[in-house]
Image (cartoon, helix red, strand yellow):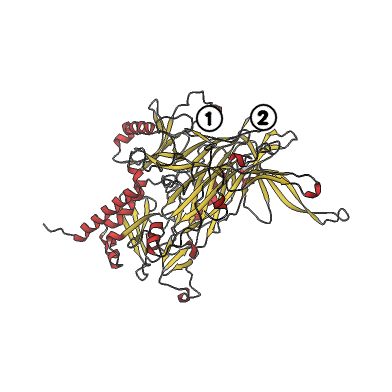
Amino acid sequence: MEPRNPRLIVSLLAAAIILIISFTHFPSSFSDHPRLLSCSSSSPFCLHSPNHTAAAHPLDPLTIPEIRRVRSLLLAHPAFQSAKSYTIHSLVLHEPEKQLVIRWIASDPLPPRKADVIARLDGEAILLTVDIKTGEVKADETRSKPLTGYPMMTIEDMVGSSSVPLTDADFNKTILQRGVELADVACLPVSSGWFGKHPEEKRRRLIKVQCYTKKDTANFYMRPIEGLTVLVDMDERKVVEISDKGKHIPIPKPVNTEYRYTGLKSSGPNPGPLTNPISIEQPDGPSFTVNGHMVNWANWEFHLKPDPRAGVVVSRATVRDPDTGERRSVMYKGMVSELFVPYMDPSDAWYFKTYMDAGEYGFGLQSMPLDPLNDCPRNAYYMDGVFSAADGTPYVRSEMVCVFEKYTGDIGWRHSESPITGMPIREVRPKVTLVVRMAASVANYDYIVDWEFQTDGLINVKVGLSGILMVKGTPYSNMNQVSNREDLYGTLLAENVVGIIHDHYVTFYLDMDVDGSDNSFVRVDISKEETSLGESPRKSYVKATRHVAKTEKDAQIKLKLYQPSEFHVVNPNKKTKVGNPVGYKVVPRGTAASLLDLDDPPQKRGAFTNNQIWVTPYNRSEEWAGGLFVYQNEGEDSLAVWSNRDRAIENKDVVLWHTLGFHHIPCQEDFPIMPTVHSSFDLKPVNFFERNPILRSPPHSAKDLPLCSLGLSLGHG
């Protein structure tokens, strides 16, 4: 019997191929295998987290047996048994009450282990808490379901949605008309945001799918099928609408899009490496230890946990006081809370690209195994993430986090006396730090997040951006073809390729517990003061004035270069010997602020970027700056909404939120792949110690280190 629709058969085959490719790209989402990628077996320092079978700390993530136990309890629950379909969007540890964790010591039994579950049964979202020991499954009383929005997508949502267009005959016809073979099509799921524009937005989980050709290049991002956008129902796996407004736009050529070393090496002249190999040698091995999820290094101790939404969570960070030997609390919990990435092209195929990479895609779900010796240096320790697939099955994201010591020749402190004093003093201390690193590849973009601990009590938090630009196809091959009146919304990078202007905002949740949980936020304004007539030969000086924030609105901070301030979190109940309240300050580095209209739908949803600093009272249900359910929400459950309640924050358990920002105007150096750019901020002690806390640290001497090669130092090696 002849098939009625040969093109449909071809479409289904192509969809199957795409699914196979997608499963290969996301192997860990569909596997229960305990390790997906092995660190180089030849390295004796390639250390891993232990088997994921037992918890040793109240904040340890759920283990493989615990996730399996939770899954079996859920499947036996009446609500699940009566449902025609279910999807588990999040299955993570239900963290014990904060004060219980603070009081816990290693000799104590663990508090009851529980799981927080966000699931959808027949399309309806529910929030559950599961007691792993007793088997009790009940509604989560600490969180309420938001008014709008859907839970974070699963990997299965993303993979499945990407294949839907290839099952549609009209879509395939359009692809063929563009001169692209179906087997060469690569599609990506693009979160659709919320605009109230489409009648289906209220009742359906919608996603937009856009496609590329991967013919003759691995860098298919540089070969967009421009103007073709498919609106897909994620639950029904069905095409809702096809928009095709780019038929006149050529598909960019694959020329010069290769970025893999093997491909570049074989495709043209090889100039050789720019530098010789480099490595930090540690003759006695690393100075840090990792016991389960507890990290000890120098004077620091903290808990480290991979997370499917936040990526990595640093908790219970304490530092040892050099004078008393006491362990003092600095931060109860720190993590990436949300990432907001709006693109600045208002045209039909681009206006909706306003990603929330944590709440929509899962920052941890998008983390990739780190590459030893390239992502992380020799002597790094690797920690896996244990996550749940959409059916509740556990899987392991291998080598998701690395921990290593870093020395780049920086100086911890120094002083040399001038010869005029007659005192031959030269005292210098090297700066060695400890880095916790993860990298997430959210489709084209790569984010590197570092938590760097210093012996002087400072924590530097750094975000790096790399990966591949999201580009737009254009008819133009040279700027001399572009009218002065035409807005490209970006930069012409190569023939028929425009890199669209966009922003990145990374909002951090920082539950500071400075010497205890009851803290205050102090804004220290730095202002010009004028001297009175005859008072001094000086006309002006700078004065620091402290303002203690009483309520949340007092602590909504927009950074201003010509009205500078410092931002302290202090414990007003504990003072130094000379009477200063002990504290830490957040020190912003180069950053950026959103320029979008506050009433623009993306900015309503991303209102947590309206300020660079917020301070809220601790509330365990308020951790995600964009809200618990970010996908297609309307912005009614966010940090901006909570803060506007204007609750009291003086001498309370408070959370500080800080947003790093990047404006990215693409340039040709970003093509075909971007060199990494960074921004960061510091959490720095301010009157926390009685004096320099690394005063007694010894200098390095030649006998402590391996001998250098004289030949290399003279350039003969």
Binning the other alpha carbons within 10 Å of mark 1 as few (below 14), some (14 to 19) or many (20 upward) gives some
Camera-near label (2 vs 1) is: 2
Q: Which residue is mark 2?
A: 324
In 3D space, how far apart are the residues under numbered discs 2 and 1 (Cα atoms)? Answer: 24 Å
**Where, by quadrant of the figure, is residue 563 drawn?**
bottom right
* Amino acid on which disc 2 is placed: Thr
**Where, by quadrant of the figure, is residue 65 drawn?**
top left
Q: Is residue 356 left or right of residue 648?
A: left
Q: Are marks 2 and 1 in contact (CB under 8 Å)?
A: no
**Where, by quadrant of the figure, is residue 580 drawn?**
top right
Q: Earlier in the sequence, mark 2 or mark 1?
A: 1
Q: Which residue is mark 1?
A: 101
Binning the other alpha carbons within 10 Å of mark 2 as few (below 14), some (14 to 19) or many (20 upward) gives few
Give the residue displayed 61% in from the left and 44% down from the top.
431
Query: Is 406 or 458 nearer to us in this picture?
Result: 406
Q: Residue 42, image x and y in percent?
A: 41, 42
Q: Is residue 331 left or right of residue 140?
A: right
Q: Residue 716, image x and y in percent?
A: 53, 55
Query: Is 86 or 181 nearer to us in this picture?
Result: 181
Query: Is 275 or 394 nearer to us in this picture?
Result: 275
